[in-house]
Image (cartoon, helix red, strand yellow):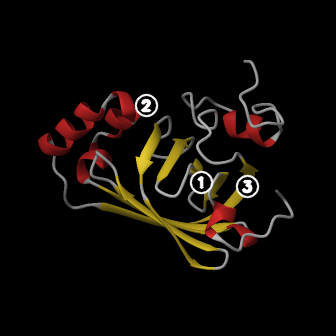
Amino acid sequence: MADKQFETLDDFLGTHFIYTYDNGWEYEWYAKNDHTVDYRIHGGMVAGRWVTNQEADIVMLAPGLYKISWTEPTGTDVALDFLPNEKKMHGTIFFPKWVQDHPEITVTYQNDHIDLMEESREKYATYPKLVVPEMANITYMGDAGQNNGDVINEAPYAGMPDDIRAGKFYDANYKRLKK
């Protein structure tokens, strides 16, 4: 994908990214289709968290410029701007107070714990929100195709982003290599 030029929304959908924010937090993110994203968090306050089938608003603002936004069951709001042709992105994460105070509750496969996320959102303080706006460098882009369940399908582990970048994680058809 090194030479791919992103011009349309279809160019963006199905792309798998790894990026590192300027604050050092490393995320892995997949544009699963025109309304759903999957992601794993490898560094930062909620490292170890992973989510599949997160409903999101995904739009192209201009050729090669994409905006994605969603609200998680935790109450966390996320707004991402991808400029893949420049290997840059900007993300703003709006963490509720309870996630800042109890991040360990969210460090799991969220899909299996939606009730806990919603319960925690009601039980603990929501405000003030911790707003984290950061620039990031995209360190990996892969053409996984849309609706590929093999992209984000297991918990993150130490060194996973390096394995993916080194070609040790997916085969030529973007299927998970045997562990």
Residue shown at 52% from the left, 44% from the top: 38
Residue underneath mark 3: 139
Report the front residue among 42 and 9.
9
Q: Looking at numbered disc 1 in the image, what kind of residue is underneath it?
A: Gly
| Image quadrant where residue 168 sits | top right
Residue shown at 55% from the left, 44% from the top: 43
SS label for mark 3: strand
Q: On the rendered structure, is 87 left or right of 99?
A: right
Separation of residues labelled 3 and 2 (CA atoms): 24 Å
Separation of residues labelled 1 and 3 (CA atoms): 12 Å
Q: Is residue 162 visible?
A: yes
Q: Is residue 27 above or below residue 133?
A: above
Q: Looking at numbered disc 2 in the image, what kind of residue is underneath it?
A: Tyr
Residue underneath mark 1: 24
Residue underneath mark 2: 109
Residue 60 position within the rendered picture, expressed as x and y whole percent measured from the top left: 56, 73
Q: Which residue lies most toward the top here?
A: 179
